[in-house]
Amino acid sequence: MTRQLSFSQAVNEAMAISMREDQDVILLGEDVAGGAAVDHLQDEEAWGGVMGVTKGLVQEFGRDRIIDTPIAEAGYVGAAVTAAATGMRPIAELMFNDFIGSCLDEVMNQGAKLRYMFGGKAKVPLTIRTMHGAGFRAAAQHSQSLYSFFTHIPGIKVVIPSTPYDAKGLLLESIFDDDLVVFFEDKTLYTMKGEVPEGSYRIPFGKADIKRSGEDVTIVAIGKMVHTAIKAADELAKHGIEAEIVDPRTLSPLDEDTILSSVEKTGRLVVVDEANPRCSAATDIAALAADKGFDYLDAPVKMVTAPHTPVPFAPTLEDIYLPTPDKIVKAVQEMTGSELAI
Amino acid sequence: MSKKEAAWMFQKMLEIRHFEDRVHEIFGTGVLPGFVHLYAGEEAIAVGLCSHLDDNDYITSTHRGHGHCIAKGCDLDGMMAEIYGRSTGLCKGKGGSMHIADVEKGMLGANGIVGGGFPLAVGAGLTHKLKKTGSVAVCFFGDGANNHGTFHEGINMAAIWDLPVIFVAENNGFGEATPFHYASSCKSIADRAISYNIPGETVDGKDVIAVREAAKRAVERARNGEGPTLIECVTYRNYGHFEGDAQTYKGEEKVKHLHDLDAIKKFYTYLTEQGIMTEEELDQMDEDVRKDIDRAVEFAEKSPHPLPEQLLEDVYVSYKTNGGAGA
């Protein structure tokens, strides 16, 4: 049997490989080792991040490279920007993407713009790993999906893997990329297992992955929505509709060609995104189809997204906040009408 | 201290302790959703401070906010229902443990963002100053937040504008799993007051009388328009950073804090030795509070879940729902 790892283990392994390959790779964040300067604490008992994703790294690489920071996001993310610009290759862990509110300037006005403002005379090989996503009952300030925020800013690359395999390959690509990358990890995917090869491999940016082939409708799904879309596709298949699921994997750069080719083949596009719907990755991809793929479309583009509200705490509300397979099936039904019987 | 005041303080400390112990117990059974951060062990701070406040005074809180809510007078039933995510919760189940709020009680919300409270308290203080209310704002924050940039921005502004704000550090020794002495380049948080030219003092945060006295000086100063104060209360949390934390970073001191140094035991001894209240009275209060908590749990468990349409409500004042924007 091929080796199975959880999403969390895949992320951990990518970091470990990168740190073995390159002494300049360091990790900074809140409790990424855990229990700094606690005399009695053995490293193997340390947290390794609030979700345990970085557990074990401090044992192999020591506290000089796995650096616990004060709870001071502007401080350590900003420091990571210039550590990157001056010779290191840092990974900064922003525990929840919601905390970008505390360090947006460092990312948006400093890290993203250094190279351009300096006329190409600087590079910022920094990877910001951050946790996102609803469905964990973590409420409004710990559940957002803010990748469209970063996609909007030139100078930032935005990566959002949906499987353990993609997570490892994309994180290695991120760490060794010479630009600022924001790497999104869905907290509800950490325990998901999948095939992950040993050793180093990299998945190039801007290369979408077709997670399922089909002829009748293209579903572009982002992050964990890939799995929601797969469930919807299984249901649609029972009714004779074959959906093609395109996982962009990176939102900046965006693999326009793969999305447009798929739409050309199927004539229909549904975009599934758990983020809020205005000025989002979903609207961006819908606009791509309208702008460059209008002639391919047999029906208006549909979006299945969260509503325009914060993430609610109550489980009963959070469950209806998120896109579901049913909502995707319904969207496909609406666009196919009687043409493809359901 | 009058008997009435003493009884109120002891009552609130018990409410916090039993509420938190009970939430800990229920969380262990897996029925509570989300993240829960418990305040047990730190009761003397919220209660000592809030003993000088009324509903017109504001407080800002932290992710460890249940104790602040209780001390500020939030309803126990409504709090418990909020933690259960029910529609009868103080925030209709939309906020949860980390966002419990009751603006009418002057409770401006628990907060999921470390360091979030400093500027929020400054804003509330600004309102008090401009409207000449004579009321104050109290900013509770942890030792982790004392290294956040908002600490500096918030306290500095409160100081230059002489705002009626009291900054209350709850130094429980750890920001998450990281010790205070590692993360903070200062011997005490109170020392940092010097840079803002305001009074700063450190008190035993397990001693409700000590906290209450320091708070009295700070609240009087604020009400008199003399500006902010920084109070550091040294304490310890009985539970982990969050429920589920193995707390491997804690050492032997843990046992001492749970027993000998316990804030409620200390106050119990004080009240009985001073003859302010009898053991019988205090024990009866303990029994009654346990029943109150039982009732709160029962209320929460019997409460309805929010209705689907509530998902779209409360986003804007101007629209009944979310404005129809892409819903």
Image (spheres, coloured by chain):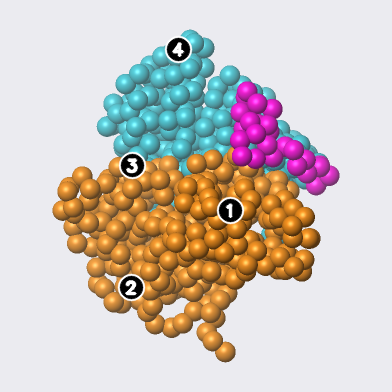
Q: Amino acid at mark 4?
A: Leu
Question: How busy is the neighbourhood of tag 1: few (under 14 within 10 Å), some, or many (20 plus)?
Answer: some
Question: Quick check: A130 above or below A210?
Answer: above
The chain letter for the residue carrying disc 4 is B
Residue B110, numbered label:
none
Pick the front one: A116 or B243: A116
Identify the element where label 3 is drawn.
helix
Determine the CA span between mark 1 and mark 3. 40 Å
Question: Quick check: B39 above or below B220?
Answer: below
Q: Earlier in the sequence, mark 3 or mark 2?
A: 2
| Residue tagged 2 | A18
Task: Look at 77% across and 40% down and name the residue there.
Answer: B307
The chain letter for the residue carrying disc 3 is A
Question: How busy is the neighbourhood of tag 3: few (under 14 within 10 Å), some, or many (20 plus)?
Answer: some
Residue B130, numbered label:
4
Q: Earlier in the sequence, mark 1 or mark 3?
A: 3
Determine the CA span between mark 2 and mark 1. 43 Å
Question: How busy is the neighbourhood of tag 2: few (under 14 within 10 Å), some, or many (20 plus)?
Answer: many
User: Where does the image place residue A158, in percent across and percent down from the top left?
Assistant: 41, 56
Q: Amino acid at mark 2?
A: Ser
Pick the front one: A6 or B193: A6
* Residue bounds of the magenta highlight: B300-327
**Magenta residues: mostly which secondary structure?**
loop
**Pointers 1 and 3 in contact (C-beta within 8 Å):** no
Q: Give the colour of chain B.
A: cyan
> Which is closer to the viewer, label 1 or label 3?
1
The chain letter for the residue carrying disc 1 is A
